[in-house]
């Protein structure tokens, strides 16, 4: 699950907002920084971390727990 | 613009819903065949957010010199006869042309350094069917490379992209499609797309399963098609794939072929008891065997044991896989988890529906002007290695060509204001900001998942469990959804997606109840064997008296016959 976006490193390019399939990340138009808005919906796909041009994002590889078949 | 101001109207000749492999190929082909205005609309970002981008990119291509009849027979057997044989042959025949087209867009396929021949691997349970792996584009690899190249080609051809617009319904009137409606997932603005033809290329439904590639697939295309009177078929055919319990992993097929083994709670290599291919069997057999082991008390836990693999496998994965998987392995290694050297707790984890919109070989649905592509279109059961990407390329290209042909003679779209108003009211059945409900959506989703992910709903079904699950779906719809807590537009879109998941759940359960046999991805405990009299399609349509009809397979024109299954 996404853990952090460094506000110091973030340049406000908005790529992570664009590539997040789950609507987790929003580019704050006022601060020009990307924010984690709905962390619980992250599916750990790494799209944001891979697209970030300045390596500002860290995604923890451990995913959310879901109901099991038994 | 607000939700109260429905004047955001887009006019186009062809509207494509969904910007993955199917939608992008359809757009490119439509443009190449003379369609003037082509628009792709996506609830995320076109080419950037769907399953296609996250796919490994392994794809079945029939090369010149390969034996089409032999490959087609493998797929026919893999689908246990529930096979649209003319579609499968068309897919195979055209597949090498698709590979060449992708190369024309800048995709580079891996080749042997000495011989210069394409590097190909067996498709898990379909040997001798072969696939290519690891396509690259610029510095990208796999599905990321494929979607990026297709996006550039579509953009270069003049296709218009509409990002972050959630399409809720198709505009169907007088048995013809006239466009679609939806709303912006950030602003809530209502959108009307008026189009002379539409390709639905957004679907599959994982019920937000336990895997990173699939959580955004919520059955939107199936649900909107069903509501509009479109025929759906094979909806009982759902593959449950496997994954580690705690993190994501792509590459079970190649590692099983290289010697990794599924183990039960007693550390037994149980798969050879069920299939001669052992752990390299097709996914449906693995999951069904796990369920049988569970019934015998031999699990959970289950494991996937990589310890027999050569040590360099981890590096090979990091260097030769594209997209998210290498980064995932690196991040896991930083935490001391060496997946490819361990015995990893594993489980059935993600559902993928093999049903969808029923089309003819031209990807035309029963509604005039409405085509289907990608996983929204049904190509029958099976989640074979390299199959999903390949069939999405085929159906996308076919739908694009067919839509272009149709548009040469099609009249103008007529969007009826009363129909638009009705669909708008159905979409905004709840206020976006704070509508009084107190039930968190996550709780509703978990209730749905507890029911859908249960072994006796999705792996080994029986009449009683399916009927119970249908009651649960009705309860979620009638009790939970009206009480959902909708605080903002994010919740609102999730509510709409959850409505679509419940609708898809009902289609799956109803079709599963009808098919009284076990075949391909559909296993019934009370009807454990395949039965030849059930070699027919179940077609769901809301306008039919019982909601479904049977359709015989056209054996007269098919190469392989029921006797070939024996």
Image: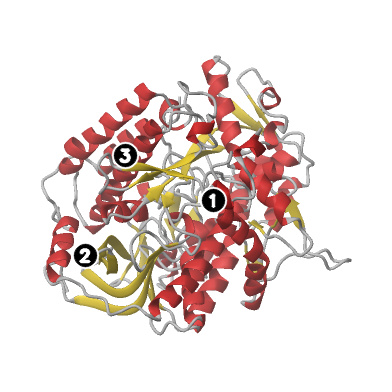
Question: Would you say B332 lies left or right of B45 here?
Answer: right
Q: Mark 3, mark 2: which one is toward the viewer? A: 3
Both on one chain, marks 1 and 3?
Answer: yes
Chain letter behind tag 1: B
Q: Residue at x 22, y 75 (%)?
A: B414
Separation of residues labelled 1 and 3 (CA atoms): 24 Å
Mark carried by residue B188: 2
| Res B453 → quadrant | top left
In front: B115, or B185? B115
Dot 2: what SS? loop
Query: Residue, x 54% and y 25% (percent of image)?
Result: B529
Question: Which is nearer the N-term, disc 1 or disc 3?
Answer: 1
Q: Nearer the viewer, residue A26 or B45?
A: B45
User: What chain does mark 2 sit on?
Assistant: B
> Residue B314, percent across and down?
71, 47
Picture residue at 29% right of the left edge, 67% below the top: B177
The reply, left or right, for residue B261 in relation to residue A26 is right
Asked if residue B105 lies left or right of residue B522, the reply is right
Extreme residue in the front direction: B556
- Gap between marks 3 and 2, in whole Å? 28 Å
Q: Which mark, by number, is residue B506?
A: 3
Could you tell me residue B469's position as x and y percent? 32, 29
Looking at the image, is mark 1 or mark 2 earlier in the sequence?
Answer: 1
Chain that bears disc 3: B
> To which residue does mark 1 refer?
B84
> Which image quadrant: the C terminus of chain B?
top right
Which element type, helix, strand or loop, lies under badge 1? loop
Neighbours of disc 2 within 10 Å: few (<14), some (14-19), many (20+): many
Q: Is residue B345 visible?
A: no
Q: Marks 1 and 2, how far apart in space? A: 40 Å
Discs 1/2, front: 1
């Amino acid at each position: 699950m996404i853990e952090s976006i460094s506000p110091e490193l973030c340049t406000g390019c908005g790529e992570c907002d664009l590539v997040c399939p789950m609507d987790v990340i929003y580019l704050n138009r006022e601060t020009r920084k990307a924010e984690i808005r709905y962390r619980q919906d992250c599916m750990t796909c790494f799209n944001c971390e891979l697209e970030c041009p300045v390596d500002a994002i860290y995604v923890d590889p451990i995913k959310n727990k879901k109901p099991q078949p038994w | 613009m607000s939700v109260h101001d429905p004047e955001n109207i887009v006019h186009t000749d062809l509207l494509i819903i969904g910007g993955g492999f199917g939608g992008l190929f359809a757009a490119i082909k439509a443009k190449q065949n003379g369609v003037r205005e082509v628009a792709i609309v996506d609830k995320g970002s076109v080419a950037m957010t769907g399953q296609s981008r996250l796919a490994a990119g392994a794809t079945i291509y029939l090369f010149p010199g390969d034996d089409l009849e032999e490959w087609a027979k493998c797929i026919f057997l893999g689908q246990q006869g529930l096979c649209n044989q003319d579609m499968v042959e068309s897919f195979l025949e055209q597949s090498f042309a698709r590979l060449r087209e992708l190369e024309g867009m800048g995709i580079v396929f891996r080749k042997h350094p000495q011989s210069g021949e394409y590097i190909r691997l067996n498709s898990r349970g379909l040997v001798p069917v072969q696939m290519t792996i690891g396509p690259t584009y610029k510095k990208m690899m796999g599905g990321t490379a494929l979607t990026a190249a297709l996006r550039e080609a579509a953009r270069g051809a003049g296709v218009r992209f509409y990002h972050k617009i959630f399409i809720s319904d198709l505009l169907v009137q007088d048995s013809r499609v006239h466009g679609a409606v939806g709303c912006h997932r950030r602003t809530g603005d209502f959108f009307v797309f008026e189009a002379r033809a539409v390709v639905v290329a957004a679907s599959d439904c994982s019920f937000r399963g336990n895997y990173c590639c699939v959580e955004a697939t919520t059955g939107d295309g199936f649900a909107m098609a069903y509501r509009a009177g479109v025929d759906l078929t094979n909806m009982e055919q759902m593959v449950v794939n496997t994954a580690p319990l705690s993190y994501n992993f792509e590459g079970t097929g190649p590692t099983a072929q290289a010697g990794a083994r599924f183990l039960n709670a007693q550390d037994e290599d149980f798969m050879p008891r069920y299939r001669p291919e052992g752990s390299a069997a097709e996914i449906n057999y693995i999951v069904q065997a796990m369920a049988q082991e569970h019934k015998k008390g031999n699990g959970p836990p289950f494991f996937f044991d990589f310890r027999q693999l050569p040590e360099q496998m981890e590096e090979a994965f990091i260097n030769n896989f594209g997209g998210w998987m290498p980064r995932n392995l690196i991040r896991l290694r930083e935490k001391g988890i060496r997946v490819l050297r361990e015995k990893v707790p594993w489980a059935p984890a993600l559902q993928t529906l093999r049903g969808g919109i029923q089309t003819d070989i031209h990807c035309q649905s029963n509604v005039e002007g409405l085509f289907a592509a990608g996983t929204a279109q049904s190509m029958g059961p099976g989640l074979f290695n390299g199959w999903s990407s390949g069939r999405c390329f085929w159906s996308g290209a076919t739908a694009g060509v067919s839509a272009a042909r149709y548009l040469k003679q099609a009249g103008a779209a007529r969007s009826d204001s009363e129909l638009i108003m009705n669909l708008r009211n159905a979409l905004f059945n709840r206020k976006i900001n704070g509508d009084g409900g107190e039930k968190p959506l996550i709780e509703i989703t978990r209730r749905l998942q507890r029911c859908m992910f249960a072994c006796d709903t999705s792996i080994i079904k029986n009449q009683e469990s399916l009927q119970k699950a249908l009651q649960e779906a009705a309860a979620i719809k009638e009790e939970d959804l009206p009480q959902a807590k909708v605080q903002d537009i994010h919740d609102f879109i999730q509510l709409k997606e959850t409505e679509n998941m419940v609708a898809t759940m009902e289609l799956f359960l109803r079709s599963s109840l009808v098919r009284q046999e076990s075949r391909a991805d559909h296993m019934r405990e009370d009807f454990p064997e395949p039965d030849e009299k059930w070699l027919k399609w179940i077609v769901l349509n809301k306008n039919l008296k019982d909601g479904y009809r049977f359709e015989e397979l056209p054996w007269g024109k098919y190469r392989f016959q029921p006797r070939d299954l024996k």
